[in-house]
Image: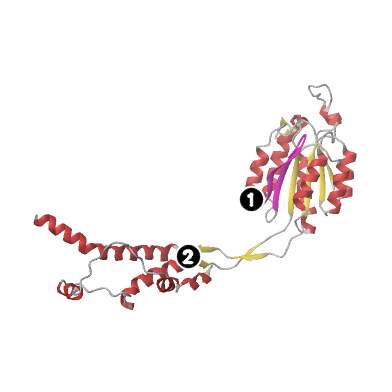
Amino acid sequence: MFEFAWPWLFALLPLPWLLRRLLPEADSAEAALKVNFLDELEQLSGRRANSHLPDWRQQLPYLAIWLLLLCASARPQWLGPPLPVPASGREMLLAVDVSGSMDYPDMQWQGEAISRLQLVKHLFGDFIEERRGDRVGLILFGDKAYLQSPLSFDRHSVRIWLDEAQVGIAGNNTAIGDAIGLAVKRLRERPDNQRVLILITDGANNAGQIAPLTAARLAAEEKVRVHTIGIGASVESSGMLHPSGFNPALELDETSLQAIARETSGEYFRARSSTELQAIGELLDRLEPVRQRSTQSRVAQSLYAWPLALALMLSLLLAGRTLWPDLAGHWKARHAA
């Protein structure tokens, strides 16, 4: 189907005529020689005298150029058939702990020991890519919480931001409350039943200005559902000590994470291995299945280049017709000399 995206631009059609009528004539402020028999001279030379206002036949090429420019400006486009676009309508923020303990290599991926943050990148990168129809954003938190990527339909870019996250980039401590508070700030303007935060951490809150439970109550008031994930191998399977002398597997504050989830009508999950973390991602897909009615979209193919190209070609032809007699006369004069 053909249509103009901005048809109101055709209201500018009489603009050149109005300007010609309303604006005063240009005055060059130079002396001019007035010849009473100019008409006779032009007739003898085979040229027709231009009247003060050209007749409609002389104006036709210029009117055509103006119409073509208006057509290009009105954005002509060809709309394809309507296609269904599924939309879940969820506004989902992923808050990832990047404190120092997330570098602890107690997780397994394809038979190799990797850090906790690396495992989150592997599994939740795919999780982000599969959230078709959702707007996804990313928060990184350590000593403070930072919005790394705002809510966006560009899931691939959000995944890239997650892949580029580094341990310690936001400090070595864990500000869980600040991460929740920042998420609430970003989600509070979104529709009530679509605000979701997934918080992944391996430690306890030991930094920031907001207590986790206080932030959770604020999230509950703003109807932000918080799903919390505690990551890290169990004490029995860890068997490794951090260089500072303590076992990071003991640092996880499951009680607080459970309370945060309970306060906000969310769920708490414990991820001790890659298998468990992958299952958590699949379960989150089932917990947030609400889909809005699918919308329809048409693929629009822009056609403005055609009238614009025609206007340019016609302008060049008019310029050539005007300049050709002078150029031809100059060329003949040079060869005659």
- Identify the residue position indicated by label 1 in the image: 154
Query: Is any part of residue 266 visible from this angle?
Result: no
Residue shown at the point (78%, 53%) measured from the top left: 188
Which residue occupies the extreme left position in the image?
Answer: 337
Q: Neighbour class for label 1 at 10 Å: few (<14), some, many (≥20)?
A: some
Q: Residue 223 at what x, y percent from top left?
A: 83, 54
Query: Is any part of residue 324 visible from this angle?
Result: yes
- Disc 1 secondary structure class: loop
Q: Amino acid at mark 2?
A: Ser
Would residue 118 be found to the left or right of residue 250 on screen? left
Residue shown at the point (79%, 58%) measured from the top left: 192
The label on residue 291 is none
Q: Residue 127 at what x, y percent from top left?
A: 71, 47
Which residue is more in the foreground, 234 or 28?
Answer: 28
Question: Do residues under tags 1 and 2 come within 8 Å of each other at their CB atoms?
Answer: no
Q: Quadrant of residue 68?
A: bottom left
- Disc 2 secondary structure class: helix
- Identify the residue position indicated by label 2 in the image: 73
Q: Neighbour class for label 2 at 10 Å: few (<14), some, many (≥20)?
A: some
Which residue is more in the foreground, 49 or 100?
Answer: 49
Q: Is residue 138 magenta?
A: yes
Q: Quadrant of residue 147?
A: top right
Q: Which residues are magenta?
A: 135-153
Question: Is the magenta region chiefly helix, strand or loop?
Answer: strand
Q: Is residue 124 magenta?
A: no
Q: Mark 1 and mark 2: span between their CA atoms? A: 30 Å
Q: Amino acid at mark 1?
A: Asp
Which residue is more in the foreground, 305 or 278?
Answer: 305
**Compared to 276, does 114 lie above or below?**
above
